[in-house]
Image (tube, helix red, strand yellow):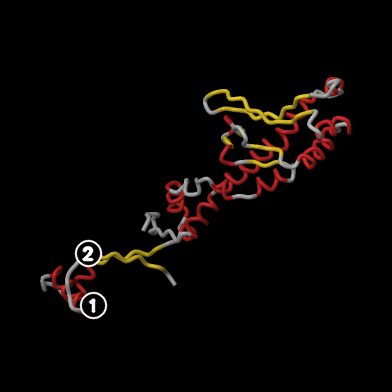
Amino acid sequence: MKKFNLVLRHSEDLEAKNEEDAMMKYFQSITDGNTDLANFISSNLKVRQAFLASELKENALEKVLEKNSDINDYDWWNDDDTPHEDMKELGLEIDMSKMSFELESRYRQLYFSKDGIKIVDLSKFLKRIKKDLSLSKKVVDAMSNGEIELYFDIQYFGGGDGRSYLRYSDYTEKAITDSLKIDLDEALQEWFDDNVINHLLKYFQNNYDYLTSKEAIIETLDANEHQFTEDGQPL
């Protein structure tokens, strides 16, 4: 079954006793009795077949996609629990309202403003970095009891650019981090960039690529029952 869009060119408010009387008065007011109903309809009723985006031919569809390229351009990341769950697995908590990111390759970045990221499960967090960085029990114990403090910092570069850092301060009596075989500052930052910053950027990039794809735009248009003429004009 095909769908059609019907548009009557006249609209008017009038007083009448009932619907039938209203229809009669309306017809009389716009024809002055000079035409019959069939002629009036043929002259004033515009009938066009209606198509969903998915039903359009390629040329018309391309016009529709171009005009609606930003239909999925909203704060879609706020509706997704996956980033929160992924960070929870690391013992972290993130606040999307304090996160800034750019997906364009030339400016690709993601960073958190103050309190945008926190360690909320220190034991889970330490278990992960101990394994990934091969940290000694002595160092991890010092982190656990606060002798080595772990915290997040941010540096702004201007123009909307910034970078988040995972830093530490060693308050142990003999500064045990000085004798480590690895540069702990560098190791922590590399771990943070790989497991948090780049992980989230990749996830958001994949979502954005899908939402701006031809398939996703058509899906949204159809789901919202947007209709078009055969040549791609909106109805």
The answer to whether residue 143 is left or right of residue 88 is right
Compared to residue 184, the image places residue 210 above or below, namely below
Residue 19: image tag? 1
The quadrant in which residue 2 appears is bottom left
| Observer-nearest of 150 and 53 | 150
Mark 2 or 1 closer to N-term?
A: 2
Check disc 2 and report the residue beneath it.
11
* Residue found 77% across the figure and 39% down from its top: 122
| Observer-nearest of 185 and 231 | 185
The answer to whether residue 1 is left or right of residue 78 is left
Q: Which type of secondary structure does the marked residue at label 2 adopt?
A: loop
Question: Label 2 sits on what residue type?
Answer: Ser
The quadrant in which residue 15 appears is bottom left
The answer to whether residue 44 is left or right of residue 154 is left
Q: Which type of secondary structure does the marked residue at label 1 adopt?
A: helix
* Residue found 14% across the figure and 73% down from its top: 28
On the image, the x and y values in percent for residue 59 come to 44, 51
Which quadrant would the N terminus be assigned to in this image? bottom left
The answer to whether residue 45 is left or right of residue 64 is left
| Observer-nearest of 15 and 43 | 15
On the image, the x and y values in percent for residue 140 come to 84, 33
